[in-house]
Amino acid sequence: MNTAPLPTVLACGAWLKNAACLLVDGAPVWSAVHGDLSDPAACAALETSVQQLLAGHGAPIAAVAHDLHPDFFSTQLAVQLAATIGVPAIGVQHHHAHIAAVVAEHGIEGPVIGLALDGVGLGTDGQAWGGELIWMHGAQWQRLGHLTPLALPGGDRAAREPWRMAASALHALGRGDEIPSRFGSQVGEAVAAGVQQMLIKNLNCPQTSSTGRWFDAAAGALGLSVRQTDEAEAAIALEAAAARCLALHPGTAALPGAVIDAQNRLDLRGLMPALFDATADGVDTAAAGFHLALADALADWATRSALERGSRDVCLGGGCFFNRILRERVTECLLAAQLRVHRPIDKGCGDAGLALGQAWIAAQQLAATTAQEQPTKEAEPCA
């Protein structure tokens, strides 16, 4: 990692829980949290905050960092601002930024393994990511693995209707013929049959590695959520069910079936039959078993990569780590493997702290480029 002073970089955040950050001498100067940029008032507040951050710092900035998604208002603002000032606009992948925010906040100087788990973020391949295993060292990073993707029947609509994600999981298990009978009474037989056909024909079914959508699938499979009006409503219901079980039965076993495949993808399909086949009085136990299995598999996945890469530091980022059961179990397992675990402190694990990671990565890239352009000084001979 480059040890020279980091250049000053402004970052405009992403979409959800937006906040801007100015990185000055490696330290963050934050704006207020504006909220989701679907609200025009939040967009206006972001513009005002950006101008205030720039006005409050005398030295010129070296770049403006932003999310990879071209349609985000924060991205468009960053690109326009960079052009106006005459500095580079640097796009930063969403989950890379989540892990970098933890690295920056803790001042970690060596290579790290990151688990970035959330609802969605645009990947470098143009796909929807959200369950990512990352290696990072300064300006360098690599996507080591991801959760096995699920189809999103109906695109973004699937994120609002957990039953669709459950239907997607059924299809992935080769049990798609059960979709109409399982969900027809809840959503209408024609709608359920239509989703079944979408999955069969792969029509309007983009793929996602999102951990949040796997939580939705689990909640839908257990009948805990059909449609959700608030963010993470299904995941919260699933966690509440698991917590009820674990409070009464702390020795509940993890479900079997999570597998790390030959491509280093974490495949959760094997956990789903126990959820679809759970009886009414077994819902809470199945929810707990799902949580424990997911946490154990994630920790094993990260531990293997840490050993292979020679890193002792694991960073946890992304909104799924608001889930207490997941967060504590993953941390416990990683510590048992003699690894150091780092989590966000100031802004929490969600998108409110993402701009710090964006700014830090852009600053690291600029510093690395500057170092490469400078002539190498010949080493002094030993006395």
Image: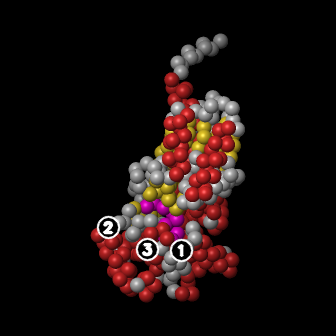
Q: Is residue 367 above or below residue 274?
A: above
Magenta stretch: dominant SS?
Answer: helix
Dot 1 alpha-carbon crowd within 10 angstroms: few under 14, some 14 to 19, many 20 or more:
some
Q: Please, what is the three-letter code of the amino acid marked with disc 2?
A: Asn
Front residue of 13 and 308? 13
Measured Cα–Cα span from mark 3 to mark 1: 12 Å
Give the total number of marks visible in the rendering.
3
Question: For the magenta stretch, what is the residue range?
Answer: 208-218
Front residue of 374 and 226? 226
Q: Please, what is the three-letter code of the amino acid marked with disc 3?
A: Arg
The answer to whether residue 224 is visible is yes
Question: Residue 16: where, in percent of width, then height?
Answer: 57, 58
Report which residue position mark 1 lands on: 228
Residue 164 circle label: 3
Mark 1, secondary structure of its residue: loop
Report which residue position mark 2 lands on: 202
Q: Contact, CB < 8 Å: mark 3 with mark 1?
A: no
Residue 175 circle label: none
**Residue at image coords 67%, 43%:** 52
Q: Contact, CB < 8 Å: mark 2 with mark 1?
A: no
